[in-house]
Image: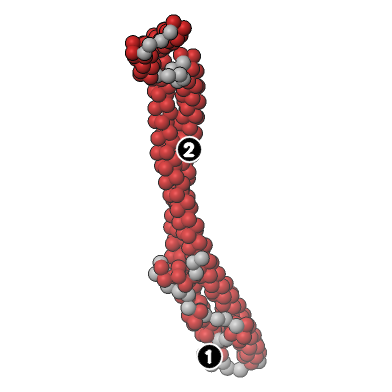
Amino acid sequence: MVTKDEVLEQYDIEPMNDADNVDLSEDDLENGSKGQLIKRAGQLRDRRNELNQMASERASKRDDLNAKTREKVDEAQEHREKRDELNEQVQEHKDSRNELNAKANELFDEVEELKQDMELGSGKSIEELKEEIEDLEFRQQTEVLDAEDERELIEKIDDKREKLADKKEKIDDTSELDELVEEAEEVRSEASKHHQKVTELADEAQEHHNRMIEAYREADDIRDEADEMHDLFVEAQEAADRHHEDFVRVQKRLRELDKKEEEERKDERAEKREEEKEEAEEIYQKFKEGETLDTEDLMKLQKTGLL
C-alpha cells in the first residue's frame, strides 16, 4: 500500500507546511485594529491563493492518475476478452479432437473386428504352415509308414495346405482392411492436429490471462496512488477554503469597522452642524438686537441659512 509521503516524493509534489498557514483567532477578529486586520486579510488572501494553486496541481495529478487507471483497466479488459475468445477456440478444438478421437477409436475397433473375422490375428503364420508342411512331406518321403500312418500323414499335409491356401487368400484380400486402417490413422492424425491447436491456443490464452492479471494489479497500484493524491488535494483545498472563510470574515469585519467609522463621522458632522446652528442663532439674536456683526459672524449666518 502506497503512503502519502511516497506519492509526494514520486510525483515531486510540494508538501503542505502547516507553519505557513495563517491563523485567525476571535480575539484578533474582534479586537484587532483596522491596520492589523488589513494586513491579516492580505496574508490570508495570499496563503489562500497558494493553497488553491497547490490544490489545483494535486487535482491535476490525481486526474492524470485516474486516467492511467482507466487505461490499465481497459488494457486488462482487452486481455480478458482476448483470453475468453481464445478459450472458446480451445473448447471448439477440444470438442473436435474428442469427436475425432472417438471416431478413430471406433474405426480401430472395426479394424480389430475385421482382423478377427479374417483370422489374421490368430492361428499360425504362413511361414509356420509352410515349415510344418515341409516337415510332414519330409517324413512322408523318408520314413517307412504303414498304410494307416501314411493315410493320417497325408490328411495332415492336406489340412495344412488348405489352411495355408486359406491364409494366403485372406491376406491377398486385405484391401478393405488397409483402407479402414488408413482412414482410422487419418482421423487420428486430424485429432492430433486439433490437440496441437488446443495446446497452442491454451498457452496463448494463459499469456493473455497473465497480462490481464498484471494490468489489473497495476491499475490497483495506480488507483491507490490516485486515492492518496485525492487526499492530498482535499488537504490543500480544505486549508484553502478555511483561509478563504477567514479572509471573508476579516473583510466583513473591515466593512463593519468602515460602517462604524462612517456612522461616527456622520454623528460628528451632525453634532458639529448642531453646534454651528446654535452659534448662528446666538449671532442672529445679537444682530436683531442691533449689535454690529463682523465678517466671520456674517459668514456663519450665511452658512446656516439665517442670512
Evaluate if marks 1 and 2 touch, with contact meaning CB atoms under 8 Å apart: no
> For this rendering, which residue is in front, 66 or 98?
98
Of pointers 1 and 2, the one earlier in the residue sequence: 2
Q: Secondary structure at mark 1?
A: helix
The amino acid marked with disc number 2 is Asn
Q: Which residue is mark 2?
A: 87
Could you tell me how far apart the alpha carbons at marks 1 and 2 are, in whole angstroms?
112 Å
The residue shown at (59%, 78%) is 253
Q: Secondary structure at mark 2?
A: helix
Q: Position of residue 177 (x, y in %)?
A: 41, 15
* Furthest-bottom residue in this view: 291
Q: Position of residue 291 (x, y in %)?
A: 61, 94
Residue 268 in sight: no
| Quadrant of residue 172 within the rendered picture | top left
State whether residue 286 is above or below residue 259. below
- Left of 111 or right of it: where is 140? left
Question: Which of label 1 and label 2 is nearer to you?
Answer: 2
| Label 2 crowd bin: few (<14), some (14–19), many (20+), radius 10 Å | some
Please tell me how many numbered marks the rendered image carries.
Answer: 2
The amino acid marked with disc number 1 is Glu
The residue shown at (47%, 27%) is 101
> For this rendering, which residue is in front, 128 or 142?
142
The residue shown at (45%, 70%) is 6
Q: Which residue is mark 1?
A: 296
Q: Position of residue 247 (x, y in %)?
A: 54, 75
Residue 189 in sight: yes
> For this rendering, which residue is in front, 257 or 168?
168
State whether residue 39 is above or below residue 107. below
State whether residue 289 is above or below residue 151. below
- Quadrant location of the C terminus in the rendered image: bottom right
| Label 1 crowd bin: few (<14), some (14–19), many (20+), radius 10 Å | few
